[in-house]
Image: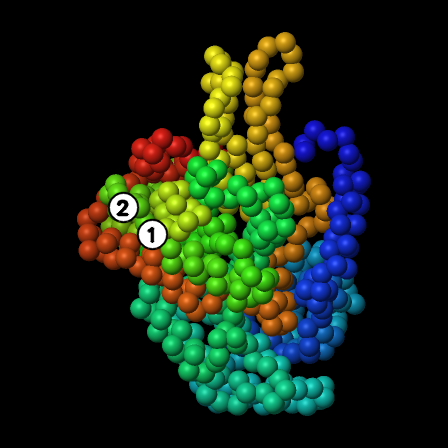
């Protein structure tokens, strides 16, 4: 609680004791959190791109610094640009220096890590380049006296996915010795609609089994997102009220202060519904709404998420259940920014949405009649992602007059970014002789409680993949269930090309129609 007299150091010490106790008591914690993967090779396709520089290599280095990688890990960057091993290592050192959370660079760790960094120039559609890559991997594995455990990461544009996986799967590159494993990490977007997602799944299943395919959504690697399951199912006080009897509604917000930056051409074909809603937002919703799994295992957890996604529907009792918006010129962070149609790569007549609000209903027993309001947008006042569960008002207010009017509903907020925290708002009497009632906050902050930075999402996800734990990755039926919900919305928009796109000024919280949308239900968006 934010008024507690207990010091931060005392809290941190208590937290470490509890964490140690959990690790000692839980076989899964001991196996998964502290286990170092088997020796393996990681091949990053698209190693010249932003993702490898900003996330993948810094994440692997941080894992190495934490002692969570095998000593002889091999990383091969595969890209179209010509580079030597030495120039690639120099680039990656600069990337680690700038983007890694583990600063400053620890020289002994970097030297060991850099020895395993290699680069191979190649074309995604040239079989000879894959044969050369296979030869290089085989020589490294033979020199290290190990069997070929291989992880292939597709950090490329989506149009290259089928070509790369087809080349890997159809040759010996994807088939190490009998005791080895092959895994493939596929970045989003996974498909463009339901039909294309099914086609991509079918293509991947021609060459790989489902347990070899890791569809990554980096939101699932964030600490607060992982903590949703612990928060719900390890605390008796919350799960009994996690249903329609006590919850009034749920709000999920994914707000960004940035525009489309240099991704105008991509965003024109995606919009916020494909970029954020279909994947990140629906994953958060599924974790909040799912039933307790029979066990904390990958398929058990994902089975329950799929059930939620299949039970969801867009509430179209008013219009089509959505409000679309597009940002115009305005001021963000104290500086003027252009409107969406002025961005590079964007058509001046574009009707692509940069803001979307939706009302979803989950047709099952637990959530009968409880609305889930989802909103996401570009060029909003600040970057924030949160899940807010608002509870119903007490059935009988015992207080009268002004005191009763001051009472607000209890709200539980899980903040995912930029700060990771959990906050519970409840009512309290203001000290004094009067009857004033005021909301107060009980807050848990990761940084303050554990006095250490949370690992980057890619650290957790890369490590889990090397360990063979797919709990935080999406399964084929999960992806298709999300697209089955979203595709009809996109098709309705397509069939009505002149449907109204509301304009909102950059630096505001979206179009006024989004406020009208939720206020028609007697509710309001949370002030952020």
Who's the residue at 77% across and 34% down the image?
6
Q: Secondary structure at mark 1?
A: strand
Residue 54 visible at all: no
**Residue 390: percent from left, percent from top:** 48, 36
Asked if the residues shown at circle 1 and circle 2 are in contact, with their CB atoms under 8 angstroms apart, the answer is: no
Q: Nearer the viewer, residue 136 or 314?
A: 314
Question: Which residue is labeled 1 in the image?
Answer: 313
Question: Which residue is labeled 2 in the image?
Answer: 316
Task: Please give the label number shown on residue 439.
Answer: none
Going by the image, does 445 lie left or right of 160? right
**Residue 349: percent from left, percent from top:** 24, 50
Who's the residue at 50% across and 63% down the image?
302
Residue 283 visible at all: yes
- Location of the N terminus by quadrant is top right
Farthest residue, direction top: 433
Q: Secondary structure at mark 2?
A: loop
Q: How many marks?
A: 2
| Residues at marks 1 and 2, CA–CA distance in whole angstroms | 9 Å
Going by the image, does 201 lie left or right of 407? left
The crowding category of the residue bearing disc 2, from other C-alpha atoms within 10 Å (few below 14, some 14 to 19, many at least 20), is few
């Amino acid at each position: 609680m934010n008024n507690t007299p207990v010091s931060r150091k005392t809290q941190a010490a208590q937290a470490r004791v509890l964490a140690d106790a959990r690790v000692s008591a839980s076989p899964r914690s001991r196996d998964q959190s502290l286990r170092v993967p088997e020796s393996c090779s990681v091949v990053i396709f698209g190693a010249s791109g932003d993702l490898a520089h900003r996330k993948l290599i810094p994440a692997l280095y941080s894992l190495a610094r934490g002692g969570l990688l095998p000593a002889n890990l091999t990383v091969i960057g595969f890209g179209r640009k010509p580079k030597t091993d030495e120039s690639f290592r120099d680039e990656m050192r600069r990337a680690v220096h700038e983007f890694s959370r583990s600063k400053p660079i620890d020289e002994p760790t970097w030297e060991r890590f850099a020895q395993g960094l290699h680069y191979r120039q190649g074309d995604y559609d040239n079989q000879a380049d894959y044969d050369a890559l296979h030869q290089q991997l085989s020589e490294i594995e033979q020199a290290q006296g190990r069997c070929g455990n291989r992880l292939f990461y597709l950090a490329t544009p989506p149009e290259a996915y089928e070509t790369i996986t087809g080349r890997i799967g159809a040759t010996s590159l994807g088939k190490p010795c009998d005791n080895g494993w092959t895994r493939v990490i596929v970045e989003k977007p996974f498909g463009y609609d339901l039909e294309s997602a099914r086609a991509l799944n079918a293509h991947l299943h021609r060459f790989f089994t489902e347990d070899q395919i890791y569809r990554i959504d980096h939101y699932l690697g964030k600490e607060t997102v992982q903590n949703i399951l612990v928060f719900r199912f390890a605390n008796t006080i919350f799960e009994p009220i996690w249903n329609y009897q006590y919850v009034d509604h749920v709000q999920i917000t994914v707000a960004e202060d940035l525009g489309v930056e240099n991704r105008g051409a991509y965003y024109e074909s995606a919009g916020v519904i494909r970029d954020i809603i279909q994947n990140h937002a629906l994953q958060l919703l599924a974790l909040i709404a799912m039933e307790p799994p029979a066990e904390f295992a990958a398929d058990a957890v994902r089975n329950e998420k799929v059930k939620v996604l299949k039970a969801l529907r867009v509430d179209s009792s008013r219009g089509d259940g959505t409000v679309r918006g597009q940002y115009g010129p305005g001021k963000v962070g104290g500086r003027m920014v252009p409107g969406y149609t002025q961005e590079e790569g964007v058509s001046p007549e574009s009707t692509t949405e940069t803001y979307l609000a939706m009302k979803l209903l989950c047709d099952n027993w637990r959530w009968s009649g409880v609305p889930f309001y989802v909103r996401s947008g570009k060029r909003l006042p600040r970057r924030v992602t949160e899940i807010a569960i608002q509870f119903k008002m007490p059935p009988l207010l015992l207080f009268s007059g002004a005191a009763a009017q001051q009472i607000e509903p209890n709200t539980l907020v899980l903040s995912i970014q930029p700060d990771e925290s959990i906050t519970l708002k409840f009512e309290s009497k203001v000290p004094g002789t009067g009857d004033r009632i005021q909301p107060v906050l009980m807050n848990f902050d990761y940084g303050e409680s554990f006095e250490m930075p949370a690992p980057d999402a890619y650290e957790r996800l890369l490590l889990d993949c090397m360990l063979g734990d797919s709990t935080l990755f999406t399964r084929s039926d999960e992806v298709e269930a999300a697209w089955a919900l979203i595709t009809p919305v996109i098709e309705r928009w397509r069939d009505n090309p002149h449907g109204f796109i509301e304009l909102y000024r950059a630096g505001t919280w979206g179009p006024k129609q989004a406020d009208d949308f939720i206020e028609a239900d007697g509710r309001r968006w949370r002030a952020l």
